[in-house]
Image (tube, coloured by chain):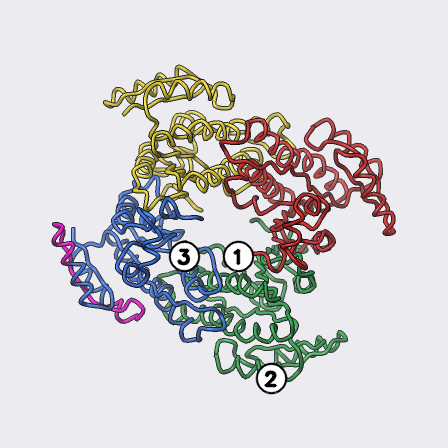
Chain colours: A green, B blue, C yellow, D red
Amino acid sequence: MLAIVTGRHPDRLQAVAAEIAQGGGRAVALAGDLSVASEVERLAVAVRAFGSLRAAIFNAGQSIWGSLLEISPQQFEEAWRTSAYGGFLFARAAVPALLEAGGGSLLISGATASIRGRGPFVAFAAAKAALRSLAQSTAREFGPRGVHVVHVIIDGGIDGERLRTGAPARVAAAGEDGLLHPDAIAETYWQLHQQQRSAWTHELDLRPFKEAF
Amino acid sequence: MLAIVTGRHPDRLQAVAAEIAQGGGRAVALAGDLSVASEVERLAVAVRAFGSLRAAIFNAGQSIWGSLLEISPQQFEEAWRTSAYGGFLFARAAVPALLEAGGGSLLISGATASIRGRGPFVAFAAAKAALRSLAQSTAREFGPRGVHVVHVIIDGGIDGERLRTGAPARVAAAGEDGLLHPDAIAETYWQLHQQQRSAWTHELDLRPFKEAF
Amino acid sequence: MLAIVTGRHPDRLQAVAAEIAQGGGRAVALAGDLSVASEVERLAVAVRAFGSLRAAIFNAGQSIWGSLLEISPQQFEEAWRTSAYGGFLFARAAVPALLEAGGGSLLISGATASIRGRGPFVAFAAAKAALRSLAQSTAREFGPRGVHVVHVIIDGGIDGERLRTGAPARVAAAGEDGLLHPDAIAETYWQLHQQQRSAWTHELDLRPFKEAF
Amino acid sequence: MLAIVTGRHPDRLQAVAAEIAQGGGRAVALAGDLSVASEVERLAVAVRAFGSLRAAIFNAGQSIWGSLLEISPQQFEEAWRTSAYGGFLFARAAVPALLEAGGGSLLISGATASIRGRGPFVAFAAAKAALRSLAQSTAREFGPRGVHVVHVIIDGGIDGERLRTGAPARVAAAGEDGLLHPDAIAETYWQLHQQQRSAWTHELDLRPFKEAF
């Protein structure tokens, strides 16, 4: 098994690939921008050269905060381009590869905002709602052909570099296990990938035990 | 009361304005493309010149059919640009005018696809889901300031020129009252606009009595 | 048009009937317990004697507060018996009468709890969720036969005797139009009853403009 | 680890316990009726005698088919008593035991009908909707205290004795992996039980890959 890691920042990708290698896994870093059609096509070709695709995970998202009257049309578009349009390009590239491989998983990360729009998240929520709809359409069409599409609603803060650097007070307030551990998220993604096809999940939520919802 | 009718096709707008005038109403036709920021800004200025805005209705939508593997990235984007981005530009222009007027209504037309993604509607549904999220964010933020945002899920075919010309067999199969009459839709929009603010509706469905759901 | 008012407390019914009469309407008070099958059957016979049924409105509900570990099985059952079982008996009596009349409306009052369960509302919410499901099943089956079933989610406090007596502080905090006016609710129910059958609503929410949701 | 199996039919329980034992596990069969408060209390005492409760799974349900005008009030009540009231009694007994044990899982089986009411399922759907609401209330209250409440929407037929005996044509039509395998369901329940508390799932669906939804 080989993990191919992609994103816009080569140095971060290398770090992730190195971490996987340290843990005994095999990983390759391929830089690219998932919101640009030609880039996604280039990545798809590169990925196929490594063998059969078994699972594809879409995590891209851009947090654009600001209410309807604060953000610009460009920002509204940018949020969509990263999460929704990027998701479309990704699914459009991954699904044929998964069909060729005889089936596989397409795991898509959503957020609270995917199912709930609120003032300051107007752009992010609209983009995530579009992505969720895309996941649903894709599941309905390609599930019967062996592509397991899952939409995971991550409802809470993730205990990672972004929050630890950008919102240390929030991290402190969350307390023990009050933010989602990346390993715990990954474990569920892994289990979803391994579900036997007579009992597939299409949508589930993941949140810290103490998160109000 | 004056109705301002907008859209990309001046001749159609004139026809609608003429129909309103024939019915004893007053209407003005202002052509413009709701998916272009500068056009929406121009329209907003023109609308204000006529007086205080009481209600704004967003109906724009483009039916792009085709599954994930059939449509192009351009088509996916076009669907979004018309329904979701257009809705953003429209809300962004209408809300300040409604706030200035001391409150008013922003009525947004959704569709079955707003809450249900399916293969051939992947682009349309993703765009409509984004629009629905936008309506929700806007309602949550501006409701307490007097802007009544409603999202109407139109779940069925509309008995209008598009279906009568494009899908006569569907019209025939629907039978009496099997398609939504535009007048019946309009009547509900009117009632929503008149709701007293202690009991506002944010979301409702509208479907023919015989429509399966 | 004649309004038939029912409930367990004859004096309150008389007061409502008297209020309708004062407003120029015609009303009859028929006492009965909607959670007892034989009572509902007796009421149904009495109602038919007055003529054709055009609309039936189900408002019964019992507010039982207390968390899972605080309430008794009897309380959990009582909440269900009033809201859900009562709704079943009511629909089972009203639908045949509406079918005989050639169609009509069955309007069912829900609450925030109908779509959201929370600790202290465990019993009430479970009962209201069951009632909502009943409304949906009934709409799907009898809509095509001319029975317009609507489920109204009342999301906020109602500005009535119960709150004014029992929670004056909440009434004061709500401010102007911060609680739903019964007249405003009634107006929407009336409009729903009058919807032309090509564009029926099955579900909508009603909340004060300033209510957070 | 010891599995305690309960239900109304001692012979079936013994068979299940024997099957677990044959697979190398340890199981005890305790007969009881989950829709009777005194029986559930008796079972709760018996279970505690075996040690600390780690997970409790509620599967009870009674399939009562028939539309609003076909079923009796007794049948409507019976459906509720088995699924919803039984679920309440079960949760009310299990939660204190799980709290005492320092936390654990309460897994509740739902069905398509939990989120969608339809004519012939009016009683079953109303009961399952109530159970889902109960699961939600319980999760919101006891999640922060370490009780992981999950509601699993089983959307499809289960490949078990009931369908094989009662609906062989449906089993044949479903084809390979067209019905949910009990082992696949169990595997997901097991994974849910093992989720690390920083990333808990409250609700998910499970359906055969080829099931339309």
In front: mark 1 or mark 2?
A: 2
**Residue drawn at 50 percent across, 40 percent down:** D119
Q: Is residue C202 left or right of residue A170?
A: left
Q: CA distance from mark 1 to mark 2?
A: 33 Å
Q: Tag 3's secondary structure?
A: helix
Q: Are marks 1 and 2 in contact (CB under 8 Å)?
A: no
Residue beneath label 3, please?
A: B132
Report the chain holding disc 2: A
**Dot 2: few (<14), some (14–19), or many (≥20) neighbours within 10 Å?**
few
Residue C86: percent from the left, percent from the top? 50, 27
Task: Tell me if I can see residue B151 in this picture.
Answer: no
Inter-mark Cα distance, 3 to 1: 15 Å
Residue at image point 60% right, 72% down: A99
**Tags 3 and 1 both on a single chain:** no
| Closer-to-camera residue (A173/A108) | A108
> According to the image, label 2 marks what residue?
A46
Identify residue for label 1.
A112
Identity, as a three-letter code, of the amino acid under mark 3: Arg
Mark 1: secondary structure = helix
Contact (Cβ within 8 Å) of mark 3 with mark 2: no
Q: Which residues are magenta?
A: B18-42
Q: Are marks 3 and 2 on the same chain?
A: no
Residue C72, compared with residue B86, is above or below; it is: above
Residue B1 screen position, x and y as percent = 16, 50
